[in-house]
Amino acid sequence: MSPLTEKIAKKAFQLGVEYAKAQLRRDAANRYSLTAEWVLPLIKCEGLLPRGEYEDDVIHIHSDGIRALVWYSPYESSKENAECDGASCVPDVLLGIDLRPGAAAHDPGYRRMKKIAQAFGVPVRKVRKFLDNMFTSVTLAENAGKLGCKTIATLAHWGIRLFGGVYHKTKKDTMAAVVVALVATCLGGCAGCVSSFFEDGGDGYESPSLIKVAGD
């Protein structure tokens, strides 16, 4: 790489970090409520969830050991009790790809990971992977046909797989740098891009009824 090219690359990275930081700050106060029942397509769960079920006032999971039916009762979010606060590792809408529906499914599950793990008798890490796969599947189904959908879904998937559990303990500047680095990697090509974990690839998927309810 020539000195000029290297200088341009460094400048572009710095600008990208500042943009990501601004987007993350703007999105940090977002809260979303689900206003109607939401049923997802059947999702593959073999090796993650055995036969069993979990239910509470928000999330319902029924598994036959190979696939799971997941649906949500309406829920409300607030600053004090945020069932869904959008995408944590990247902006809620990234380059035109809407990550909010994925978060609407993913966030309530993360809040209940230990209880879900206990209900199915599996380690929390397996529940977390199942929820991350669900986030990715919703994101792909919600944005099907949009330019860059698989690339951004891959970025978001690995963002939550690698950093979802430690996001709130990590400095935002570091997270912003990670976002830019992952975007650059993904935009370089989508070999190894994620695929849907929905049994039929998301056929029959319906978008959730979400409203933005609060901000700081």
Image (spheres, rainbow, N blue to C red):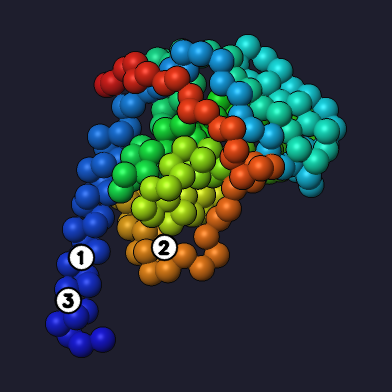
154 vs 95, left or right, is right
Q: Secondary structure at mark 1?
A: helix
On screen, residue 212 above or below 93: above
Q: Nearer the viewer, residue 64 or 164?
A: 64
User: Mark 1 — residue?
Assistant: 12
Instruction: Give, as a three-letter code, the residue at label 1.
Output: Ala
Kindly identify which numbered label has been placed on residue 186. 2
- Determine crowd level at label 1: few under 14, some 14-19, many 20+ residues with C-alpha closer than 10 A: few
On screen, residue 35 above or below 26: above
Mark 2 vs mark 3: in front: 2
Instruction: Give, as a three-letter code, the residue at label 3.
Output: Lys
Query: Which quarter of the figure is the C terminus placed in?
Result: top left
Question: What residue lies at 38% left-to-right and 48% top-to-bottom?
Answer: 146
Question: What residue lies at 56% left-to-right and 42% top-to-bottom?
Answer: 137
Tag 2–tag 1 contact (CB < 8 Å): no
Q: Position of residue 119 (x, y in %)?
A: 78, 26
Q: Position of residue 114 (x, y in %)?
A: 68, 30
Q: Tell me which label, 2 or 1, sits earlier in the chain.
A: 1
On screen, residue 162 above or below 216: below
Q: Secondary structure at mark 2?
A: helix
Question: What residue lies at 59% left-to-right and 47% top-to-bottom?
Answer: 196
Q: Position of residue 179 (x, y in %)?
A: 36, 54
User: Mark 3 — residue?
Assistant: 7
124 vs 34, left or right, is right
